Amino acid sequence: MNKTDIKSMTIEELTQAIVELKQPKFRAGQVYSWLHQKNVESFDEMTNLSKELRKTLDDNFELLNCSIEKKLVSEYNDTIKYLFKLNDGEYIESVVMKYKYGYTICISTQVGCKMKCSFCASALDGFFRNLEPSEMLAQVYKAQKDLGIRISHIVLMGMGEPLDNYDNVIRFLDLITNDKGVNIGARHISLSTCGIVPKIYELQKQKLQITLSVSLHAPSDEIRTKIMPVNLKWGVDELLEACRSYTSHTSRRISFEYAMINGVNDTDECANLLALKLKGMLCHINLIPANEVKENDYIRSTNERLMAFSKILESKGITVTVRRSMGGDIDASCGQLRRGYEKGGNGFENSCKN
Ligand code: SAH
């Protein structure tokens, strides 16, 4: 018999299932709290339930957890990177970052990725599978437990493309913001996409208060197609039209990610064209010095280039932030740790050139 993935169930679904097992309704609240507030990883830990009920639950439901395969802590103790092992033996990565305002976790939404952005390590070994909502939750719960902290912010910016696993991601967002669970405010959650245009239109209908980040990385089809194959399907103008629609439906500012790669997308022309295309949009640009990955030859832009690029954008009225690089010493950028590990390395070797 196929067991049901209990942590992916909403409280309403769980209540129905508990009633079907001839249990009083209030048991559902207890079970939900064990799973989502106390973050237990086995039915046996649910000590206010009878042994018999714990066995019934175990017979009917499965718990998708993740175990810590490797953990890397950065020199200043402000970035912790996990390589998690899932129940089926697949590996995913999550990164916890400590900021003044609290702890943020960057979680994965898929094992591998289909998108094949040329600068990113996540898709180098291809795509394996989607993560279940419970496996996205498990990353948050495990990190909280391991570090003895409460995570206040979540970014869906780890391995995978969230909008390519749309239904599971929406369910995850529903569960993680539920006040009977960890209750993280939607405004403390960012979802990053490479630009799956139809899903942006679908997402806007949900009217969520989350922040949508869009990995733009280039202002023209010519450059973007070279580094992001997804651009062949939905070009820059089509993507930006979807973004304008998103902001007008949700009144939420879009955050554009722009990884600065030397000689590829960091010229003054690029900055000028970018400013022109984003004119009047409710947005800001996050400039990221590209992380150099061993498997490609890209070099990050110089600091001077970054500043000049940022100045042009600002002079044209676009808000710009330059992302502080964290965890460079522990391969904190996407896919790098998993890749080092899968290739037979110990996961601690530097697959990053810098
Ligand atoms: N698939 C989603 C989320 C995962 S990647 C997306 O594309 O947005 C999270 C962010 O890291 C994206 O903006 C991605 O483009 C960026 N990224 C990936 N590899 C990078 C690298 N080597 N240097 C800088 N940013 C990188």
Image (cartoon, grey):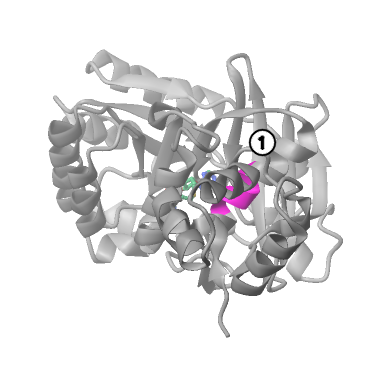
Query: Magenta stretch?
Result: 136-140
Residue type indicated by callout 1? Val
According to the image, label 1 marks what residue? Answer: 96
Picture quarter with the C terminus: top right
Q: Residue at x 47, y 56 (%)?
A: 14
Q: Residue furthest bottom?
A: 1
Q: Secondary structure at mark 1?
A: strand
Residue 52, placed above or below residue 268: below
Left or right position of 26 against 43: left
Predominant secondary structure, magenta span: helix
Give the tally of numbered discs.
Answer: 1
Residue 327 at x, y = what percent?
Answer: 71, 35
Q: Residue at x 84, y 52 (%)?
A: 348
Left or right position of 268 against 297: left
Left or right position of 222 against 6: left
In front: 185, or 272? 185
Residue 147 included in the magenta stretch of the image: no
Q: Residue at x 43, y 52 (%)?
A: 10
Residue 338 at x, y = what percent?
Answer: 70, 60
Q: Quadrant of residue 168?
A: bottom left
Under 8 Å from ligand 1: the CB of mark 1? no
Residue 57 at x, y = what percent?
Answer: 64, 65
Residue 270 at x, y = what percent?
Answer: 30, 37
Residue 65, placed above or below residue 33: below
Residue 212, placed above or below residue 188: below
Picture quarter with the N terminus: bottom right
Q: Residue at x 64, y 62 (%)?
A: 64
Task: State whether residue 298 appears in this view.
Answer: no
Task: State whether residue 213 appears in this view.
Answer: yes
Check disc 1: other Cα within 10 Å, few if <14, some if 14-19, many if 20+.
many
In front: 317, or 55? 55
